[in-house]
């Protein structure tokens, strides 16, 4: 590939998955990582992308939020691996909350198909609830409220009022982005408020993030790293980010490639 073809390849990839790593590009282009970083630096100066730890992200604004249908086909293998690691965290006799998201949808699928039955899952997501309903021997709770039709989650006053009367052993939360400096974030106020509520009523707070969420911010802060007990991510996650979480009291689980 010549330089223009490499630039087009990078921008096309960022349209599909919003972030890409230096190692991926080095392999795709048969270039050294130093050369790839120089190319990304030039493209950042031109304003067509934003560099992150170990790669680059698209220049979508902090309000960008992919729909459920868009997210469903993005990084499916990574999400399945994260969900499998999350399922291993669940013990018999526990009440667990599954936040809205395609990774938590994969976790719901594992709950339905797995052997654990003495558990009580709760969710505010329509698709997650429909998946849980496939198991007749698992009793689940769905939290209603204002329906956000792009991602099929329920938020707002009614949802928060119901959650104010519940407590969970584990809360599995998703976010749109994460940076070390600021923490976990999402594009909308309603989602952020609900996620913070789940964190406060969960004995163990578990964040599920695939590697594309690292290195950028959405508009609204959910929580700082210190407010989360466990971070579960995939094998692509940059080590320079995950290695320091222990100092903040966060246990990091790297889900292996299946």
Image: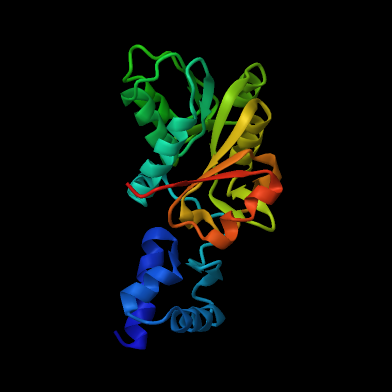
Of residue 28 and residue 196, the one placed in the foreground of this image is 28
Q: Is 112 positioned to the left or the right of 146 in the image?
A: left
Quadrant of the image occupied by residue 50? bottom right
**Residue 256, position in %: x, y?**
40, 48
Coloration of the structure image: rainbow
80 relative to 232 in the view: left or right: left
Q: Position of residue 231 (x, y in %)?
A: 56, 44
Q: Specify the quadrant that holds the N terminus.
A: bottom left
Looking at the image, the residue that sits furthest to the left is 1
Q: Report if residue 243 is visible in the image.
A: yes
Q: Position of residue 104 (x, y in %)?
A: 44, 35
Name the spot of residue 240 as percent of width and height, x first. 58, 62
Name the residue nearer the viewer: 21 or 239. 239
**Residue 18 higher or lower than 49, as above or below:** above
Q: Is residue 77 above or below residue 120?
A: below
The quadrant where residue 146 appears: top right
Pick whichever, 48 or 237, lies toward us.
237
Q: Up-down: is 177 above or below 114? A: below
Asked if one can make out residue 62 in the rendered structure from this viewpoint, the answer is no
Which corner quadrant of the image does residue 157 belong to?
Answer: top right
Which residue is found at the position 36% from the left and 19% from the top? 133
Front-lying residue, 76 or 70: 76
Identify the residue at horizontal 66%, vertical 25% (top origin): 201
> Looking at the image, how many numbered discs can be counted on the residues?
0
């Amino acid at each position: 590939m010549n330089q223009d073809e490499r630039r087009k390849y990078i921008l096309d990839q960022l349209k599909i998955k919003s972030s890409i790593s230096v190692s991926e590009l080095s392999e795709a282009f048969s270039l050294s990582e130093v050369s790839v970083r120089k190319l990304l630096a030039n493209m950042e100066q031109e304003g067509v992308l934003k560099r992150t730890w170990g790669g680059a992200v698209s220049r979508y604004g902090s309000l960008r939020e992919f729909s459920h249908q868009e997210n469903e086909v993005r990084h499916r293998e990574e999400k399945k691996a994260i969900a499998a690691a999350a399922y291993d965290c669940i013990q018999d006799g526990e009440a667990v909350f599954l936040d809205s998201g395609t990774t938590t949808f994969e976790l719901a699928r594992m709950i339905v198909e797995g052997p654990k039955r003495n558990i009580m899952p709760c969710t505010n997501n329509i698709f997650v609830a429909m998946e849980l309903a496939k198991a007749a021997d698992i009793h689940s709770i769905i939290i209603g409220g204002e329906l956000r039709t792009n991602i099929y989650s329920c938020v707002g006053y009614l949802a928060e009022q119901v959650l104010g009367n519940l407590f969970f052993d584990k809360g599995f939360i998703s976010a749109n982005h994460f940076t070390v400096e600021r923490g976990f974030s999402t594009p909308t106020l309603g989602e952020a408020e609900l996620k913070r509520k789940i964190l406060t009523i969960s004995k163990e707070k578990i964040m599920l993030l695939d590697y594309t969420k690292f290195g950028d911010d959405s508009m609204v802060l959910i929580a700082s790293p210190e407010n989360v007990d466990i971070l579960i991510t995939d094998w692509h996650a940059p080590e320079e980010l995950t290695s320091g979480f222990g100092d903040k009291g966060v246990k990091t689980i790297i889900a292996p490639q299946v």
